[in-house]
Amino acid sequence: MAAAFDYQQAFSRNIGWLTADEQARLRGKRVAIGGMGGVGSVHAVTLARLGVGAFHIADFDTFDLPNFNRQVGATMSSLGQPKVEVVARMIRDINPEADIEVFAHGVNEANLERFLAGVDYYLDSYDFFAFDVRQKTFARCAELAIPASTAAPLGIGTALLNFLPGHTTFEQYFQWGDLGEDDKAIRFLVGLAPAGLHRPYLVVPAAVNLAERRGPSTIMACQLCAGLAAAEAMKILLGRGKVRAAPHGMQFDAYRGKLVHTWRPGGSSNPLQRLAIAIGKRMYLKALGKA
């Protein structure tokens, strides 16, 4: 006979790095995660094991074979199944008491308010090219004073930015405005990881196909994203520990064994950033065959 679930016992090994009171507080926190793919699925599982008690999770896609290299919910038994339903089951297998609201059609203008209702923290996991919904979600987080983070899987590493109430917003940093998708993509690429630690060891450049909106990925990067983002989430949700807000950022690359803290005041208006954007634009448009 299976043992009955007990929250305190299930997460007792967190105690030491957390106090019992802090663990109880995490049980009452609600986190929204947009996207249940490579980073989103492992974000959800990691935060569930940290003991976060409530989730809003969103995705409209189903699992397919090309997801197997990096998405923790992608298995032979889950092929063709909705990602958000599979991940919800994984969370409930970890914590049967978890309060989970599933957004099976993804996040859109019609359900954005509900997606962010009562949320203590938002963790961005949308597809890289989901510019419109990402812009609207971060804008609404800023209006509602919801702390938000994005952790990008880059090579065999991750880059992270925190957008906290009272600090630089996503829009102030990236300055997307009404720009076209090509310009948003370039600013996002450059702004996520100004240090560019991942660039030197791309051994098959042809694997990056911007026209088809696909590129190489690794499970190591997704797991590093989740570890770093969950550490930030813990500090933000519990109000302890130093949290760097944008325009500060960080990139850790496990392949090169390097950690860099970046600071780009003014975001896309920063002189260094403007130069990187100009160079990036030429390379990006060339890769798309538009240059």
Image: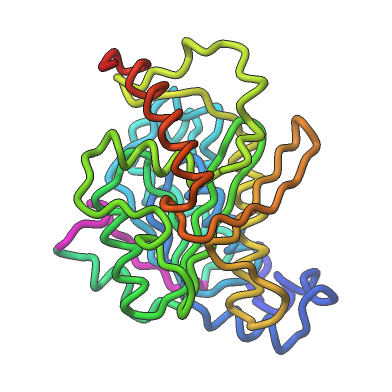
* Residue 196 % position (x, y): 61, 35
- Could you say which quadrant of the image residue 201 lies in? top right
Q: Residue at x 41, y 67 (%)?
A: 169
Q: Residue at x 59, y 47 (%)?
A: 159
Q: Locate the N terminus by quadrant.
A: bottom right
Judge whether residue 106 is colored magenta.
Answer: yes
Q: In the figure, 158 relative to 22: above or below?
A: above
- Camera-side residue: 12 or 207? 207
Q: Which stretch is magenta?
A: 97-109
Q: Residue at x 25, y 17 (%)?
A: 290
Left or right side of 16 for 277: left
* Residue 280 % position (x, y): 44, 30
Left or right side of 9 for 117: left
* Residue 171 % position (x, y): 35, 60
Outermost residue on the bottom side: it is 21
Q: What is the number of callouts on the image?
A: 0
Left or right side of 265 for 16: right
Q: Main secondary structure of the magenta part?
A: loop
Q: Residue at x 20, y 57 (%)?
A: 108
